[in-house]
Image: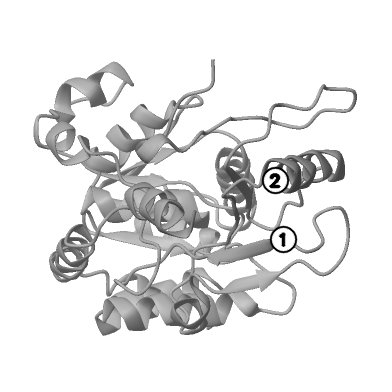
Amino acid sequence: MAPEGRDGVDVIPWSAQVGDPMPPAADVLVEAFGCEINPELIANYASSVRSRALNHCWINLEYLSAESYVERCHGLPSPVQHGPGGGLLKFFYYPGYTPSTGGLLREPDLARRQQHFQPQPWLARIGVPADGVRCFSLFCYEPAALGPWLLALAQDGSATRLLVTAGRSTAAVRAEIARLDGACPGWNCDGRLKFIFLPLLTQTDFDHLLWSCELNLVRGEDSLVRAMWAGRPFVWQAYPQSDEAHHAKLKALLDRMDAPTSLRAFHQAWNGVVEASPALWQGIALPEWAAAVQGWRENLLRQEDLVSQLLRFVSETT
């Protein structure tokens, strides 16, 4: 049985596979993040809409960005000109950071769960001793600045334990360790930089990781939002694009956050906008970053979440 959304709107989750039968027509059709819907599904949807005179809502759920075009384009209708859905109306729906956008994903109980979370027992379960060493988390692609940053952490006055997520992050760190071992023997001889390579985490445990660390380095859009809700200092690596469009996306976010100079500089180096320098890594100002992130988080919490806004938009549109 399909779940029922608010105000009687039918929500039928379905993922198209070759040869799958078409699901019954729903009131709402959502295509997300530039992934086109199977033409057979669109044809089935359009046929049902026309034959039954359904009040329908076709939504193009877009990528998250802080750029100004998001507010201009959010909620705009777009007539479908061609294909099996020709003649229907599609609406652009943009997640975002302001009341003029579609908001961010946020569970109703998120703040309560975070308030009752105890970091140390969770850290102990993943093998982190209670020795007072600061913990940073790393979820990244392969930033060019990774090696220089690891070297700077190994030479820093404070010991650091780096909690490295599975997959590309682990591969990138192991590659840089091997490179540093060959180029700079003894670079971490004092053991000031300690590594814990994590297994794959559930979404809940990824949140726990973010809530347990003094600094979170995250990548992509989903983990960026989770890092914002965590309220801890974070550095974001945008998905690298060949035309460097991610540089504009990064700048828009930092401007929207009113990020302090040191946080902005670190982001720019981490994303390859500028070349990293040893002085940059020494300029990490966690208290200043924490204050900025927490202020940003409070601003976002005053806005309605994405799902609530989306359901209201559907209700008003149909």
Q: Nearer the viewer, residue 311 or 208?
A: 311
Q: Can residue 3 be seen by looking at this rendering?
A: yes
Instruction: State the CA–CA distance, disc 2 to disc 1.
Output: 9 Å
Q: Nearer the viewer, residue 154 or 252?
A: 252
Q: Quadrant of the N terminus?
A: top right
Amino acid bearing label 1: Leu
Amino acid bearing label 2: Val
Report the side of 257 relative to 14 (left or right): left
Return the x and y of residue 109 as percentages of the image width and height: 20, 34
Q: Quadrant of residue 173?
A: top right
Return the x and y of residue 240 as percentages of the image width and height: 64, 66
Specify few, some or many for label 2: CA neighbours under 10 Å numbering under 14, 14-19, or 20 or more. some
Image disc number at residue 49: 2
Tell me the residue that label 1 is attached to.
Answer: 88
Image disc number at residue 297: none
Q: Secondary structure at mark 2?
A: helix
Which residue sits furthest left? 116
Q: Secondary structure at mark 1?
A: loop
Residue at (31, 21) in percent of width and height: 127
Report the side of 186 relative to 259 (left or right): right
- Verify CB contact (< 8 Å) between mark 2 and mark 1: yes
Report the side of 57 relative to 24 (left or right): left
Residue at (15, 71) in percent of width and height: 288
